[in-house]
Amino acid sequence: MSLFQSILAVTVLLGAYLLIVLDRLEGTIAALIGATVLIVAGVLNQHEAIGFVDFNTIGLLAGMMLIVSVARKSGVFSYLAIRAAQLVRASPAGVLATFALGTALLSAFVNNVTVVLLVVPVTFVMCDELGIGAHPFLFSEILASNIGGTATLIGDPPNIIIGSATGLGFDAFAWHLAPICTVILVLQIAAVHVLAGRTMQASPESRQRIMAIRAARAIESRYLLVCSLIVIPAVLAALIMADMLRLEPATVALSGAGVLLLLQSVTAPRTARREQLSHSLAEVEWTMLIFLVGLFVMIGAVQKAGLLGVIGKLLLAFSAHSPAVAAAVVLWLSALLSALVDNVPYVAAMIPVIKSIAPALGGSKAMGSLWWALALGAGLGGNGTLIGASANMAVAALAERSGLRFGFLQFALRAFPLMLVSIAVAQVYILWRYA
C-alpha cells in the first residue's frame, strides 16, 4: 500500500466517523460511501474488501433477529417481562438491576450480540407496561453485555482471538477476568441508577396493575411458544459448544432461524406462508447489517495500512522493559481505540505486537498481565461509544425501530466517562494482582 493510499484509508474512516458523530449523514450511507471510495481508489480490491467483512457477525445478527421475530409472536417476551417485573415488585430500579445482571450473565457464555437481541424486546414490553422510558434500561444492558462478554473466553470475539493465539483456556479467562468484571458490573449498575434514577418512576397504580396481571395470559400462541422454547435453548447450547461441534455461530443462528421459520409455516395456510415469511424478514434490521459491512471494509483498509500496529509499537516502545507499564499502556490504548474502532481487527493487530516485545519483558511468563490488559481494554472499551461494539449497534437499531432515538453523542456523553471509570478500576486490579 502506497503512502497516499494509507493516508486515504485513515482519512475516509475518520471522515465517515465524523459524519456519524455529528449526525450529518446516516451511518449506513457513510459506511457504504466510504467503502466504495476505498475500493474505487484501489486501496482495497474487491476480493480483499470481502475478506475483511466478518460474515460470521452478519449471519449471527440476521439469524438471531429472525428467531426473535418469530418468538415474539408467541407472546413469550411479554410473559418474561411481566414475570421479571413481578419478581422485584414492579420496581423500576429493581428491574434495571435484574435485567442488567441477567444480560451480563448470559453474555459470559453466549455472544453478547445474541443476548441483547433476546433481552431488548423484553425490555420494551416491560417499559410499556410500567409507563416509563426504556433508554436507561437499554443503556444499562449495553454496558452489561460488554462487561459480561469480557469475563470469559467465549463471551466476546476478541477473547476468542486472544485465547486462540495464546493457548489460554476457558478456566484461565474466568479465573483472571470474571472477578474484576463482576465488580465493574455492580459499579456500572449503581452509576446508571444514580444518573437516571429520577426518570425511573412508575406510579403506584402502574406497579399494582403489573402485580395483578396473570402472566400466562400474555401467551398468544402456545404452539409458537413451545417451538421457541425448544429452538432458542438449542441454539444457545449450540453457540456455547460451537467449537466442539465445529460450527460457526452464524451457521448455528441461521440454522435455528430456518427451523423456527419452518415450524411457524407448518400451521399457517398455504396462501399466507409467503406473507408470513416476508413479515419475519422485514423485522431484520438490514440498515445495521449493511452499515457493519461498510464499517468492516473501512477498518480493514486501515488495518492493511498498518496504522494500528504502528501506534502499538510506538507506545509500547516506551515501556519495553517494564511489564507493569506495558500492561497499563496496553489497557488504556486498547480501551480508547476500541471505543472508536471495532475491537476485533484491533486485537488481531495487537497480538503480534505484544508477542514481539515478549523477550524484552522477560519471556512468556511475564506476558500474562498484558493479555488480560488487552482483553479488559478491548472488551470494556467497547462501552465508550455506539460503534465501539456490535452489541451497541444492535441495541441502537432495535431502539430506533421502536421509535426511540439513540444518538451517538447522547450515548457517548454518558457512556465514555463510565468506560473510563471501569478502565481505572481494571488498572488498579492489574497492578494489585500482577505487579
Image (cartoon, grey):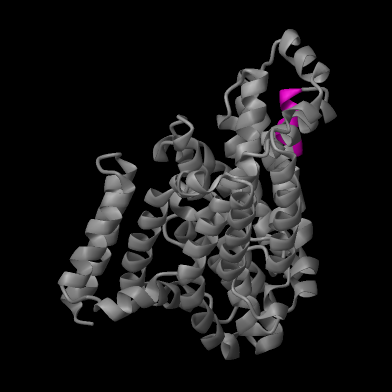
* For residue 99, side relative to residue 60 (left or right): right
Q: Quadrant of residue 155?
A: bottom right
Question: Of 203 and 55, which appears nearest the observer?
Answer: 55
Residue in the image at 74% along x and 78% along y: 169
* For residue 190, side relative to residue 405 (left or right): right
Please determine whether, in this image, residue 345 is positioned above or below residue 188: below
Q: Which image quarter holds the C terminus?
A: bottom right
Question: Of 227 and 128, which appears nearest the observer?
Answer: 227
Residue in the image at 36% along x and 55% along y: 291
Q: Which image quarter holds the N terminus?
A: bottom left
Q: Quadrant of residue 73?
A: top right
Q: Is residue 370 visible?
A: no
Residue in the image at 30% along x and 56% along y: 31
Question: Of 26 and 187, which appears nearest the observer?
Answer: 26
Dominant SS of magenta comes to: helix
Please determine whether, in this image, residue 13 is positioned above or below residue 55: above
Q: Residue furthest front?
A: 270
Question: Of 201 and 354, which appears nearest the observer?
Answer: 201
**Is residue 389 highlighted in magenta?**
no
Q: Is residue 230 visible?
A: yes
Residue 266 is situated, as x and y percent measured from the top left of the image, at: 62, 52
Q: Residue furthest top?
A: 205
Please determine whether, in this image, residue 97 is positioned above or below residue 256: above
Magenta stretch bounds: 91-98
